[in-house]
Image (cartoon, coloured by chain):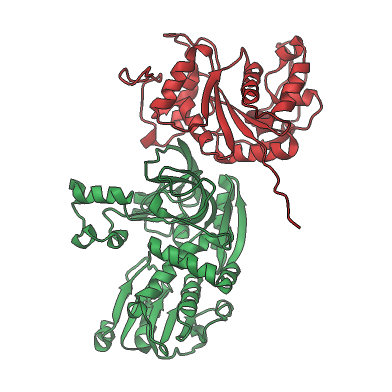
Amino acid sequence: MLDTVYRLVEPRRFEPVEVAITPGEHDIVVRPSYLSICRADQRYYQGLRSADVLSAKLPLALIHEGIGVVVQDNSNNFAPGTRVVMIPNDPATTLDDARVCLDADSRVGLHASCASDIDAKTFCRPISMFHGSDCDGFMQELAVLPSCCVETIPDSIDNQIGPCIELLSVAYNAVLQLAGGSIPAGATVGVWGDGNLGFLVALMLHVLYPQVAVVVMGKHASKLASFTFVQQTVNSALGDRPPAVNYAVECCGGRGSGDGIAQILSVIQPFGEVVLLSVSETAVPIYTRTVLAKGIRFIGCSRSKREDFTHVIELLSAHPELRTYLSALVNDVRTVRSVADMAQAFEADAHNPMGKTIMQWNV
Amino acid sequence: MVMKEQQQANVFACILAGGRGVRMGNPDTPKQYMMLGSAPVLIHTLEKFCTIDRFSAVIVLCPATWVQQTQDLIAHYGIDDERVVVIPGGVDRNETIMQGIAYIESRDQLDDQTIVVTHDAVRPFVSYRMITQSIQQAETCGACDTVIAASDTIVSSTSGTTIDDIPDRHRMYCGQTPQTFKAQRFSQLYRQLDTSDKNQLTDACKVFTLAGDTVALIPGDTSNIKITYPQDIRIARAMMDDATSAPAPAIASVPADEALHA
């Protein structure tokens, strides 16, 4: 079957290309319907990645946050017309292929821990593929995914917040890394970063741990005002000092990562845990003396698994207020009918200080 | 109050795969049977239509002499959608559409709401959006054409030697397919035309415009090219990803050990 894939060929320029796709016996063909632009997409679009990375990755179809409708299912698990969220982290082409891969010569380079653990494979670069980074993302006429990479969405979750499930699942996965997935009541968790990711991490902490104090650190009063559900916000731009925290999640990203980590180290309690969730394009200095003196644990995390998607969908179904908060995060929904519309959506999104830009995919 | 669910119209696809010169060894083989990457043009087109759940049947109308080979190709390329049927077309485009409508009628599924989506087999880059949007428009408007804005100036000439008129290009469009409409209405209007009128028809939507019926427009795409001339295949291959447009035999063929199975 021919599929039109809309690839970024160089910063700020999309081009369509026809690709012959052959869905396998475990594959599902999804018609993307609503797609959300992520900061990671913007780094490619604006050419903010290094020249080497751009040279190696482009041309590439962007977008890893999206929902769609099943149009063909060779695995016979999803009826045509079923609304699904697309899971961009493909641990292997299919679960069966993963087993084949493990048994074949292609296992060269595979980590021993990945060989027996499908979750570990999610993070294993030799075989896992992340759509919109390692392979084409969802800016396609039709997306072919293994059946393990889609999950049904209930009617209670509307189309416009559906694409946010992916980022929410990343936040959910990150929060579960703290304290072995069981943060004790009375603890204080600090979230560094007042952007979309910080908002969703704080939201997950709020829903999963109502007995835990959540404090958000940021630099923008207008953004911090959106965090109405947390115990405290701290505006560093005003010189406010964060309180002591037991756990921390770093969501600053970019050049703010270093400052955020430094501040975390200054206020976190001994034996605290820190999840690093955002991306820095350059090396970030870390004052290791404090890390050693306090016995701090750092956990790197930026991906999510199918079970995270499943749990997030359950949470969204059970908590109407969670859906309302997500709706507030969606600040622009644009119908995309052409390559020109795609570029305009990315340009508009680049100027949004916060919130998600959703593309209603109609090309 | 209990709302009565509105019954959806039956929707059929008619893939127009006709053409002359369909004899074994004829160098002028219809372009729908030429290879484009890994499969014949017709197969690419058919696969896209099979992704649309609304179709009750996807009817491939091909020359009578090529029905068996078309069925062989469909089987060979793994299209096991039971909605696909292959039947002989007519002597020209609109007669072929009438053959498709006659087939729908033979299934007792033709009524005044039945919709038929007609599409050139030699337009393999038709998109999911075009097909679904075309159906939606035909449901509300009765008939729908797919067009792109004319990029060249259109010149009108009766004699073929001098210009009669140069219409405003901003009002000119180039017709593509799908063309989608209420099947029974098309059949009724077509039967009312005399032979002279029928001979002047180059497309199905004109049957509606001649009768004064409204025909809606939906945007096509410059990529939705019609593979008419041999060089068009080269253009089509150039539009494809390098990895999937590898050279292949010029004409589709079924391997000897798989061909002509019972």
Question: Is residue B214 left or right of A311 when viewed as pictured?
Answer: right
Q: Could you say which quadrant of the image residue A339 lies in? A: top right
Q: Quadrant of the N terminus of chain A?
A: top left
Residue B139, position in %: x, y? 70, 38
Residue that appears at 44% across and 29% down: B237
Colour of chain B in the image: red
* Chain shown in green: A
Residue B61, position in %: x, y? 56, 21
Establish if A189 lies above or below A148: below
Establish if A210 lies above or below A105: below
Residue that appears at 53% across and 14% down: B63
Q: Could you say which quadrant of the image residue A261 lies in? A: bottom left
Residue B127, position in %: x, y? 55, 37
Report the number of numbered marks. Answer: 0
Q: Quadrant of the C terminus of chain A?
A: top right
Residue that appears at 65% across and 37% down: B134
Q: Is residue A137 visible?
A: yes
Establish if A343 lies above or below B85: below
Residue that appears at 68% across and 28% down: B110
Q: Is residue B166 visible?
A: no
Question: Is residue A251 left or right of A153 when viewed as pictured?
Answer: left
Q: Could you say which quadrant of the image residue B89 lies in? A: top right
Residue A347, position in %: x, y? 56, 57
Question: Is residue B5 left or right of B107 when viewed as pictured?
Answer: right
Which sits in the foreground, B199 or A16? B199
Question: Is residue A355 left or right of B236 when viewed as pictured?
Answer: right
